[in-house]
Image: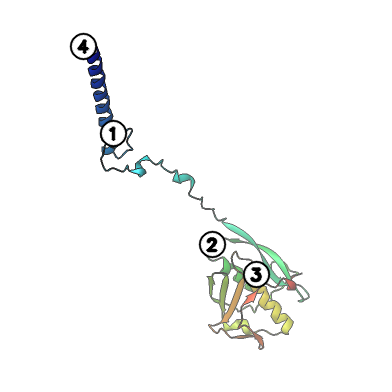
Amino acid sequence: MKRFFKTVLAFFLAMVILVGIAYAIDLNRMNEGKPVMFSSWGIDYSPNEEINMPQEDKSNNIPEKEEKPKEVTLSLYFADENIAHLKAEKRTFSNDENLAKSVVQAIIDGPQNTDLCSLIPGDTEINSIKLSGDVCTLDLNDEFTNFTGGTSMENLAVFSLVNSLCEVDGVSKVKINIDGNKKAMFGGHYSLEDMFSKDVSLVK
């Protein structure tokens, strides 16, 4: 009988020791904000979930910034030898914040191909050029309007600029002002009041 009680006492003591160890383990985990292994032992406790969440590898989620090419090759449009259509001439430019201005200046300076010709008056100067969304607003001096030619030539001259500027990435509309005048006339009777979009029907 005594042996039975000794066995029961030993078992009880072993259970007390195991429970004590479990309590100590959980108490330590609760102090560290970790989830308990056995029980919260009646303590009002919520584990710190952020500690146990795996760290997100943010390095793989950052999109690599696409490197902008240092140079771009664009089509500039000049009148053909018969001044009946526009023809493209490839030019390479520095791909910087002055790209649109460089395109306009190249049109003013004229083509490299001797079979093509510029219809822009040579004394034309750029007052300013601004990009806003898909619109390029170009302000030229009054010399641009000193144009002698019929309506067809006026149209080619304007779209020589418009089609060339629409080659610049992001530009789809062009507004031409003259010394700040938004409703100027070109060649005496060609209105520059509206915005222009690229006209491929003029290109051959």
Q: Which quadrant of the view contains residue 203?
A: bottom right
Q: Position of residue 33 (x, y in %)?
A: 30, 40
Residue drawn at (69%, 74%) of the image? 118
Residue lying at the far left of the rendered structure:
2
Q: Position of residue 153 (x, y in %)?
A: 72, 80
Q: Who is closer to the viewer here, 196 or 53?
A: 53
Residue drawn at (60%, 71%) of the image? 104
Q: Which quadrant of the view contains residue 172?
A: bottom right
Counting residues from the N terminus, which is met first, the one under dot 1 or under dot 4?
A: 4
Q: Are marks 3 and 2 in contact (CB under 8 Å)?
A: no
Residue type at the position of mark 3? Ser
Residue beneath disc 2? 96
Q: Position of residue 95 (x, y in %)?
A: 56, 60
How many marks overall? Answer: 4
Disc 3 on helix, strand or loop?
helix
Look at the picture and state if 140 lies above or below 26: below
Q: Is residue 30 left or right of residue 56?
A: left
Which of the image's four quarters has the C terminus? bottom right
Image disc number at residue 164? 3
Disc 4 on helix, strand or loop?
helix
Counting residues from the N terminus, which is met first, the one under dot 3 or under dot 1?
A: 1
Residue beneath disc 1? 26
How many angstroms separate mark 3 from mark 1 (CA)?
74 Å
Residue beneath disc 4? 2
Which of the image's four quarters has the N terminus? top left
Counting residues from the N terminus, which is met first, the one under dot 2 or under dot 1?
A: 1
Q: Residues within 10 Å of mark 2 (few under 14, many from 20)?
A: few
Disc 1 on helix, strand or loop?
helix
Residue type at the position of mark 2? Asp
Counting residues from the N terminus, which is met first, the one under dot 3 or under dot 2?
A: 2
Q: Who is closer to the viewer here, 112 or 97?
A: 97
How many angstroms separate mark 4 from mark 3 (CA)?
108 Å
